[in-house]
Image (cartoon, coloured by chain):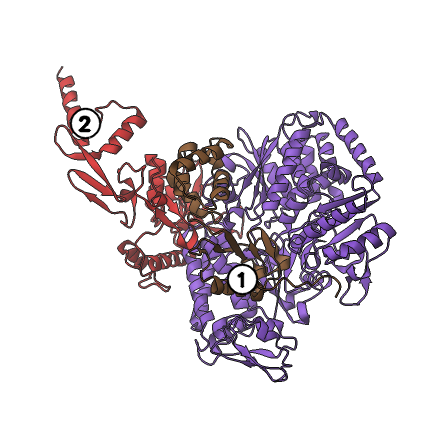
Chain colours: A purple, B red, C brown
Amino acid sequence: MRFNNIKQLEEHREQALKNQQKVKNTILVCGGTGCLASGARDVEDELRKQLAEQGIDMEVELQVKITGCHGFCERGPIVSFIPSGILYEKVKPKHVEEIIEKTIKNDKIVTKLIYKDPATKKKVQQYEEIPFYKHQTRIALRNIGQLDPTSLDDYLVRDGFKGLVKALGMKPGEIVDEIDKSGLRGRGGGGFPTARKWKSCIKAEGEKRYIICNGDEGDPGAFMDRSIMEGDPFDVLEGMIIGAYAIGCEEGFIYVRQEYPLAVVNLRKAIDILREVGLLGENILGSGLNFDIKIARGGGAFVCGESSALMKSVAGKIGEPRAKYIHSTEKGLYDLPTVLNNVETFVNIPIIIEKGGDWFTQFGTEKSRGTKAFALVGRVNNTGLVEVPMGITLRELIFEIGGGIQKGREFKAVQTGGPSGGCIPNELLDLKVDFDELTEQGSMMGSGGMIVMDERTCMVDVARYFLDFLKEESCGKCVPCREGLRQLTALYDRIVAGYGTLEDLDKIEWLAQDVMIGSLCALGKSAPNPVLSTIQFFRDEYEEHIRDKHCRAGVCKALTRLVIHDECIACGKCIEVCPTDAITGAKKTVHVLDQEKCIACGSCVEICPVDCIKVEPVKVAGEVAS
Amino acid sequence: MPEIIIDGRRLKCEEGETVLDVCKRNRIEVPTLCYHEAIESWGGCRLCMVEISHPKWPGWSNWVTACLYPVQDGLVVGTNTTRVRRLRATVLDLLLARCPNSSVIQKLAAEYGVEDTNYEPRLDGDNCILCGLCVRVCDEVIGVTAIGTANRGASKEISEPLKEPPVDCIGCAACAYVCPTDVIQVIQTPDYRVIWDRTFDMYKCVECGISHITVEQKDWLIAKDNLPADYYDLCDICKRKHTAEKQKELSML
Amino acid sequence: MTLTVESVNSRIDEICADYPVDEASLIEILHDISSEYNFLPADALRRVSERLDVPIARVYGVATFYKGFSLTPRGKTIIRVCKGTACHVRGGDRNLDELQRILGIGAGETSEDLEYTLEVVNCVGACAMAPVVVENETYHRNATPTDMKRMITGEGSDEDEGGDE
């Protein structure tokens, strides 16, 4: 099959829609990494097996599909149904028989599998009614979880390639104008206006141009792009094809992290299908547009999220950034004009073209139009993937959608923007999430990782964690980043070991400021953000580490002494989890913790049902050996 | 022709020049460690950072590397502001911690008021500051690419490929020549040269007998530039002598 | 399995045949070699350098720059402890400590019998189930030190925490 023109594509879409209408029931099994890890494959296999045994046809009237990530990873494996909209959580193979009997054959609910709102204790059976989903607006994630990611028909049924069809009837300049009108800004973190980037590339001189999709989602704690590439690959490719037409380019690359194997598999399948039907290759849909996309796998380097390093990596070289006094839209890949946009930016393109730039401006704020996908993770109840209009407050995100903090603990901070971002404390929770407000507070919205921290998180440790990460991930080209981050880590090591002084703290601030202005690329320039923002908002914790030799969160081992208090109910749970057998005790006797054996790992604190194991200061630095 | 202002001096410059080019021409001192005229600028050592602003954008200023920043008309450059001096002092302090025994770094650091490093010194290290000049001269100028870097970040190092004596090396010693901190060891005798754990036979001038090039380098250059086989039979001095004699003969005719 | 230069060369030639003779193919080829041998043998790097006409110094630089490659043989079971932020704040370090204790090897090391390699990796993008430990292709969600013990020693089985609570 090959679509030589738009008419043939539309005829095929019609046919696909007709086929779809015959389907009475679709069972969607979430195939996101979270659900797969909880056994979604086994559920799918069991479903297919039992349906086959009962002679139920799985071709026409009933379909079982493994989809991309639904986002509600906390509750996986997720199984949902179209058209009824029922959503089941934590489904195991043993539930399959009942699901078939009740839900598929008799339209009844399996009550124990539906979501129970922890706040209201009410059971919620409809997908859209669950608070986690109710407050979301899904544009970039609109298809994920709703279709088989590698089925072109599924994509066409959900209006796939309508954007491209419309774009091919427009002049390239009109496409850029439409994007301009939408106010779309880069979703990778920088927030640069997409239309302006494209215009600058169009203006630049060069024998040819490149378009690259940045799928090197390196920020730890972020997996929006992973879910999009895995769950809706055609959408990303369609965005790139429209981009290629708008800027006039024949060759595109999609740079994917090597840590994302399923994304590579699904993108490869999608590219193969598009080549086969003529939506990639020569003379796409008879329009005269020639364009093809290659996948470039990353090698495992955070710095390759930086545009100039990424382009070096695509060219097969070490990912060392260069000074960008000349923009990559003018001198990018192989020194030729290049447009580089992030995955989430590209999936916004087809729908903006299809529905118009004005339509897009109804979402978000004046300067940050549209929605943004976030990975809401850490110590929050509903972890997962969410998409909300920009301008929502952090409080709404964390407490309404996220359902608040685990185990009713106290919120301490939320880390946004990955290693380039900062930590935002309780008093700033009413900040609006958009490109500009968080930046003013020394953090940034970034690509969308949002890590919630509670009283069990040590802010000194968090800053040290990011430094340690960046020290390893620095390319090593420039002195402030390579040597500066090494020295900053050494200073933190002193503090968490109990040997820090207040002078060290001054030294940290001084050096961090110089690393910030002295480094060559964004990695080094933004590396001090977690340091400076934690010092700004949590200075008391630093001083506690230094002066009182106390880590109140019980994370810095050398500064942690765990003590079992008399509230102990002698349940024995801590004895079971202690990796060094440091806790002893019998029924009805308060358990005893041997300080000699204790490695202060905190497993017991986590499991204790009555919170009777407390973190107390050590008396002398180095008192607790680790 | 663009004009820029450096430290209050209005200076004429060429389109496409960098700030450092203009500074050099006008004898304005800007320290560098990873820069060399023959090699493409890289911006790694960050010592040549200067403060820039522009009357077109009031209130805006930035810190950039002079070796890479292209001049534009009206640019205002400060090469010696308080902030620039602090930045350089920090960079040198960090380098001093990396290479506490390098006299070159000690001297430069002292010029910026750093006598002892404020940071944790690396006690077991060599004097390599990872400026990359050796790798870049080998790759860009010589065209051999015998050595490179290994690893990244804090564990980055200049390295022979696979940690073995570099197979592609021609023993030209350009790397040792450009090294600002004299890390690359060269043993030179009349008959051979040892560098990167490899021994190269020397080729001698047929006239004066001086060893002037390694055999590998001679063969490599002849093949690369398509030169006559006897091109390197004479050393530079004897070659000049010959040329001078020839000119003399010609003029006498 | 002993690797002879000949066997490596012919396999590398096959791998390279799938790609254009261009430096841009280097990282893809190194990935393929890595899946073939579980590491990058020195002879393979030499051969790739010849086939792509890229100096060995550059091939070596790339092979050591990117974390996805190892120049030493890795174990049959590769255990990857995610060090993403979400895993970190949910106590992922405990799992690493426990694995180091049980296996007697540090992060980045391989056991002498080539059974296990322990790696600390950047965020695997499975943050909602933090802390995560990946055993070859299997993701262990909400992993605890006790789970680690069970994973290595095979004692006990995964408890069922299914929806009927």
Query: Which residue lies at the image location 46% right of the left edge and 58% below the top edge?
Result: C107
Type of amino acid at the residue the image marks with label 1: Thr
Type of amino acid at the residue the image marks with label 2: Asp
Q: Chain of mark 2?
A: B
> Do the residues at pointers 1 and 2 share their chain?
no
Query: Which quadrant is the N terminus of chain A positioned in?
Result: top right
Disc sitting over residue C153 in the figure: 1
Query: Which residue lies at the image location 56% right of the left edge and 66% below the top edge?
Result: C145
Disc sitting over residue A255 in the figure: none
- Compare residues A56 and A130 and report the one nearer the observer: A56
Rate crowding at label 2 as few (under 14), some (14 to 19) or many (20 or more) other CA atoms within 10 Å: some
- Compare residues C50 and A359 and report the one nearer the observer: C50
Can the viewer see residue B112?
no
Q: How many marks?
A: 2
**Residue identified by numbered label 2:** B233
Rendered location of residue A235, percent (x, y): 68, 40
Question: Would residue A83 appear left or right of B172 to someone viewing this image?
Answer: right
Rendered location of residue C133, percent (x, y): 56, 58
